[in-house]
Image: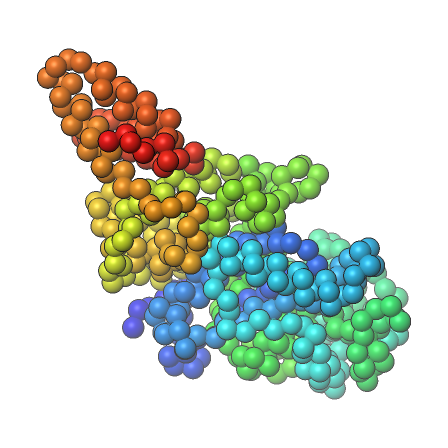
């Protein structure tokens, strides 16, 4: 069986994936808080871990991989949005979940095995909280239940921070009922206008961190293979997940994976800079979901990714060329070189470089197989090119013949006319001693090629 190695944030090194249960793999990835559309940065972990999901399914079999990605549907941001819009909380969360799945479908993300909503697992959260109190790791104070960080000796080890550093570098909620400023909420009280559930500590709702620990335990058991998310979750969310789960007696995750953050045109994405946009904004602008996916996968997941207009236009041109090449071709077996690249800590950038080589050598079957492995070049991403794929080799051959004839007659008018027509159709013409190469650009319009030959 193919050996998969993954960078483990916990140990700061690459490790071989050795499933806890031989032949089966379990993975949990932190999902969205559902109060608004997913922005482009939210799409990166979805695409990264969807690619890992596809690799695991390829190696172990689709029915041997359990992938959980949750929805946080109880949160103060959701409560605020409900008050702001006059909608019920359920209307907001149901609607946002539907929009989220629609946008993630558009970028080619498979649905995880399980997509639990936090509100469906309140009792397991209450039970875990009660267990932590009983074991001396949590305490009740003024209707709140807080985790006592000093009760867990390894607190801060995962993110590599001392307690003093964590207090200095984070926005700690100051509250008189806390024994330690870093103690975090497991349960908090709800008023008449706030969603709440019955508990031993009164009507209330869970804190954010307890959600994932409880849902992972319910769906994947005492321990599981992989836990993923963006590196902005390392602290405090994942640090707190580990603390409460370990203190509850759960081994929790073996391998932790984190993707780096996304920038836009070299700058941090923010509304104040005017470079903040959602996945839907891009789709509505005419950027195909497959192009978004390609751009994301062109940078290794552990490196910062810079989203630029130039990158997405180049990606669209590449995908147009590749789709024309694989049109009507059956995919071959995934090559050993392709599988080795992806199995080496999801080296998608290296795999895409290998796909360029396949395209240049005319290996259409291998190209289609490699694309399928990482969610590209498939029919499920829609006919965004418009109509059937155009075989540009017919036009490059015609241009080559015209050039050969012009070299003899010294009359290059036919060559110039053909180059002009191709350029106006959105095709970049590259001519050299080695031959003619035609590359469709983002402005490619196949209809302008009609009647050209």
Residue at position x 64%, y 43% from top? Answer: 276
Left or right of residue 446, residue 210 in this image:
right
Q: Quadrant of the N terminus?
A: bottom left
Q: Quadrant of residue 422?
A: top left
Residue 128 visible (yes or no): no
Q: Position of residue 31 (x, y in %)?
A: 60, 64
Residue at position x 75%, y 55% from top? Answer: 171
Q: Position of residue 198 (x, y in %)?
A: 81, 82
Determine the residue located farthest toward the front in the rendered image. 451
Q: Position of residue 237 (x, y in %)?
A: 65, 64
Q: Quadrant of the C terminus?
A: top left
Q: Position of residue 404 (x, y in %)?
A: 14, 23
Left or right of residue 292, residue 94 in this image:
right
Residue at position x 67%, y 37% from top? Answer: 273
Count of marks placed on residues: 0
| Looking at the image, residue 436 lies above or below residue 52 | above
> In front: 274, or 14?
274
| Looking at the image, residue 411 lies above or below residue 58 | above
Residue at position x 84%, y 78% from top? Answer: 203
């Amino acid at each position: 069986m193919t050996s998969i190695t993954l960078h483990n944030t916990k140990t700061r090194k690459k490790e071989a994936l050795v499933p806890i249960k031989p032949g089966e793999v379990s993975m949990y990835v932190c999902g969205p808080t559902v109060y608004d559309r997913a922005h482009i940065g939210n799409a990166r972990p979805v695409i990264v871990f969807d690619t890992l999901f596809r690799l695991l399914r390829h190696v172990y079999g689709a029915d041997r991989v359990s992938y959980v990605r949750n929805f946080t549907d109880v949160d103060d941001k959701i409560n605020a949005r409900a008050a702001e819009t006059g909608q019920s909380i359920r209307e907001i969360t149901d609607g946002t979940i539907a929009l989220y799945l629609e946008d993630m479908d558009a970028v080619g993300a498979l649905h995880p095995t399980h997509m639990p909503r936090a509100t469906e697992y309140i009792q397991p959260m209450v039970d875990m909280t009660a267990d932590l109190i009983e074991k001396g790791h949590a305490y009740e104070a003024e209707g709140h239940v807080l985790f006592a960080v000093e009760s867990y000796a390894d607190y801060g080890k995962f993110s590599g921070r001392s307690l003093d550093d964590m207090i200095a570098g984070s926005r700690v909620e100051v509250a008189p009922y806390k024994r330690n400023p870093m103690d975090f909420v497991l349960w908090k009280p709800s008023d008449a206008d706030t969603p709440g559930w019955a508990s031993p500590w009164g009507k209330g709702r869970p804190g954010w961190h307890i959600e994932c620990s409880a849902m992972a335990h319910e769906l994947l058991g005492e321990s599981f293979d992989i836990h993923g998310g963006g590196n902005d979750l390392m602290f405090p969310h994942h640090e707190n997940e580990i603390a409460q789960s370990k203190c509850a007696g759960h081994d929790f995750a073996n391998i932790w994976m984190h993707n780096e953050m996304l920038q836009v045109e070299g700058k941090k994405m923010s509304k104040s800079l005017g470079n903040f946009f959602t996945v839907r904004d891009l789709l509505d602008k005419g950027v195909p979901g497959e192009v978004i996916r390609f751009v994301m996968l062109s940078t290794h997941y552990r490196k910062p990714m810079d989203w630029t207009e130039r990158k997405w236009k180049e990606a669209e041109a590449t995908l147009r060329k590749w789709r024309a090449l694989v049109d009507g071709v059956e995919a071959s077996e995934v090559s050993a070189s392709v599988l080795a690249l992806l199995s080496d800590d999801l080296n998608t950038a290296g795999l895409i470089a290998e796909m360029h080589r396949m395209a240049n050598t005319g290996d259409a079957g291998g190209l289609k197989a490699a694309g399928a492995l990482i969610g590209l070049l498939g029919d499920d991403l829609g006919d965004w090119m418009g109509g059937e794929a155009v075989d540009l080799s017919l036009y490059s051959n015609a241009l080559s013949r015209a050039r050969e004839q012009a070299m003899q007659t010294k009359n290059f008018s036919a060559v110039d006319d053909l180059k002009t027509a191709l350029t106006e159709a959105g095709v970049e013409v590259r001519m050299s001693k080695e031959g003619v190469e035609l590359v469709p650009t983002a402005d490619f319009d196949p209809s302008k090629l009609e009647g050209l030959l």
